[in-house]
Image (spheres, rainbow, N blue to C red):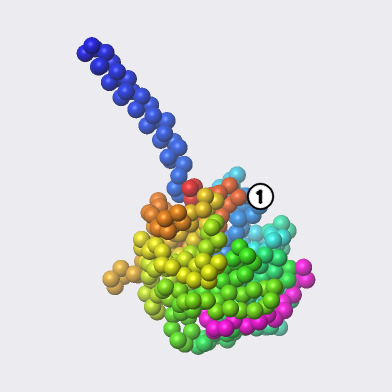
Amino acid sequence: MTRLLHSLSSLTVLALAVTLITAAPAEAKHGWSLAGHLVTAVGPGNAFALSDGRVVSVGMTGDDEDWDWPAATQTWSASSNAWTQAASKPALPNIYEAVAIMLDDGRILVTGLCRKDCAGASNTELYDPARDSWSMPGQMKAGRYLHAAVKLSDGRVLILGGCTTYHCVRGTTRVEVFDPRTDTFTQAAPMLVHRVCFTATLLADGRVLVAGGYNTEGVLADNETYDPASDRWTKNAPMKSPHVGQVAVLLHDERVLVAGGDCVPALPCSAADLFDPLIGKWKAAGPLLQPRDKFAGVTLKDGRVLVAGGLSYFGNLWKDLETAELFDPAHDKFVQAKSMAHQRGGLSLALLPDGRAMAVGGDAWLDEDPGTAELYTP
C-alpha cells in the first residue's frame, strides 16, 4: 500500500511537471516581443496596419515640443520582422502637428498646419502604400493643429477643431469633411464648443462623439455628438472627470471608454469615464492603475482595451512609461498587463488583422536612436 501511494505520488508529480513543461510555451506567446528597429524616430498617431499584415508608419518627427512633418515613411514586414524606408517622400516640407488617418481604400490622409515653405499654404497630403506614392488632394479651407480626425461610416473623414493659427489661444469650432471619392473638402456644421487636444470617436450608430480637450475655460468635461445625416450637433451631459490629451475607444458593447490624459493642466491623471450612447450619459470607470498622458489605446478583438506607454509624473520627475494595462468591459476595471521592453511616451498602437497590436515609436527614443517597435500578443 505504501509503495502504491508512493508510486501514485511520483506519477502525480511527474504529470504536474509534464503539464508545466508543455504549458510554458503557450504562456510565452503572450505579452510583448521585439518587432524590428525603426528607420526614423517617430511620434504619436502614425502607425497603420495594412490588410496584408504589414504596418506602415508615416509619422511626425522632432521632439515633444515641436512635432513636424515629414518623417521618412517606413513599412514593417512580418516575414522579415524588419522596417524598410519608402522610396517616395511627401511633397510638403513642413506641416505642423499633423494628424494622419487611414481611408477605406488604404490611403492615408494627413492634415495639419503649414508653418513655412508650403506651396499655396497647402495643409493636406495623401500617401498610398500600395503605390508607395504621395499626392496633394484638395486642401482644407483652414489648416489646423491639435485637432482631431475621424472616419465616418460612409468612408468620409471629419476634420474637427484645433488651432488654425500658430500659438493660438482659443482654438476653433470649424469642421470640414473630406470625401475620398473626389479628394476634396466641404464645410460642415461647426462644433458647439471651441476645443484643442480632444478625442473624436465614431459610434456604432454612425454619430461621432467629441469629448474633452482644452480651451480658455480650462480642461473640459464638456462633450457633444455629431449626426452626419442631419449635420447637427447635440450637447451631452458632462463627463464625470475633465480630460485633455486622453485616449478614447469604442467598446464592443457600443459604449465609449475615455481614459487618462490631464484632468488639470499639465498633470497626468488616472480617471476613466464610460459613455452610453443610448442614454447620452456618463459614469465613472476604472480608474487607470497609473496616471498617464501621451499614451495610446486600442480595442482588441476579444473586447478588452490595451493601453500602453505614455508620460507620468513621479514627485518632481517626469518619466516615459513602459507599463501597459488592460481594461475589462465585463467589470469596467483595468488590470495590469505585461510591460513593454522600452519606455514610450507619444507612441502609436496599431491593431493587426491577426489580433496582435503593435507599439511604434515614442519620444523616449528621439535623442540618439530611432528606436524599436514591439508586438503585443493577447
The residue sitting at 67% across, 70% down in the picture is 157
Horizontal arrangement in the rendering, residue 274 relative to residue 165 (left or right): left
The residue sitting at 36% across, 61% down in the picture is 289
- Residue 377 against residue 96 in the figure, above or below: above
The residue sitting at 49% across, 61% down in the picture is 297
The answer to which of 300 and 63 lies nearer the viewer is 300
- Residue 124 against residue 165 in the figure, above or below: above
Residue 89 horizontal/vertical position (percent): 66, 66
The residue sitting at 57% across, 64% down in the picture is 46
**Residue named by callout 1:** 52
Residue 29 horizontal/vertical position (percent): 46, 41
The answer to which of 98 and 6 lies nearer the viewer is 6
Residue 172 seen in render: yes
Horizontal arrangement in the rendering, residue 325 relative to residue 142 (left or right): left
Horizontal arrangement in the rendering, residue 347 relative to residue 234 (left or right): left
Instruction: Specify the amino acid type for callout 1.
Output: Asp
Residue 167 horizontal/vertical position (percent): 52, 86
Image: magenta residue range: 181-200
Q: Quadrant of residue 183?
A: bottom right
The answer to which of 49 and 298 lies nearer the viewer is 298
Q: Quadrant of residue 27?
A: top left
Q: Secondary structure at mark 1?
A: loop
Residue 197 seen in render: no
Horizontal arrangement in the rendering, residue 264 relative to residue 124 (left or right): left
